[in-house]
Amino acid sequence: GAGVSQSPRYKVAKRGQDVALRCDPISGHVSLFWYQQALGQGPEFLTYFQNEAQLDKSGLPSDRFFAERPEGSVSTLKIQRTQQEDSAVYLCASSFEQGGLPYEQYFGPGTRLTVT
Amino acid sequence: AQSVTQLGSHVSVSEGALVLLRCNYSSSVPPYLFWYVQYPNQGLQLLLKYTTGATLVKGINGFEAEFKKSETSFHLTKPSAHMSDAAEYFCAVRVGYSTLTFGKGTMLLVSP
């Protein structure tokens, strides 16, 4: 079946522009995660949804970052007034998990954001 | 808070040689431990995980890892490297219902 998909795969934005990154999770997956992966680093947690509820947004680096999942399926990560330090790969992951044992998180290919 | 340390940002082996990628974790409670692999321009793929039970865990592509609580380690091994194993490998820890905390990754280079 289809895996996690993300679009666009690559995005170049000028400093100060707003961007929106989309994640389509695996059908039926309750949990959805966003991670930020800077060059040469491991992924770092940004935010977590269970269905449409955003249960944890402690990893969002600033109030310029906003995520939503209004119908409990597709999610959008929005970055306002992009800065050069926002340049990174943004990874989305989904899983069956509903707060029990840690089911596998399935990762999408990521969106590479470059802010010039 | 939990953390992960991966020793060596790059590891080079010859094809057919043993692969050993090191991971140490810090956690105040029993952790769940994971190894992921990332090929260029692709997302992360789960190799194996330790949750409870047997401390020697076997994963895909011939990889295995052993959870050693006394050493707070979860090193990844493979008896014989293939060229197709060249990729970046990430160790991750999760405590309870929290999210994954990743190490900085180790790039595995395999030479003929």
Image (cartoon, coloured by chain):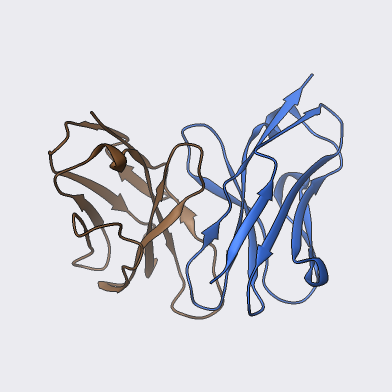
Chain colours: A brown, B blue
Work out whether B26 lies above or below A22: below
Residue at image position (47%, 50%) is: A43
Number of numbered discs visible in the structure rendering: 0
x then y, percent, for residue B103: 58, 52
The picture quadrant where one finds residue B17 is: top right
- Which one is nearer the viewer's eye here, B10 or B67? B10
Decide if residue B41 is on the left or right side of residue B80. left
Work out whether B94 lies above or below B18: below
The picture quadrant where one finds residue B18 is: top right
Residue at image position (82%, 71%) is: B70
- Which one is nearer the viewer's eye here, A64 or A25? A64
Decide if residue A108 is on the left or right side of residue A57. right
The picture quadrant where one finds residue A52 is: bottom left
- Which one is nearer the viewer's eye here, A89 or B53? A89
Decide if residue A74 is on the left or right side of residue A3. left
x then y, percent, for residue B57: 77, 62
> Residue farthest to the top?
B112
x then y, percent, for residue A112: 34, 36
Residue at image position (46%, 80%) is: A99
- Which one is nearer the viewer's eye here, B15 or A3? B15
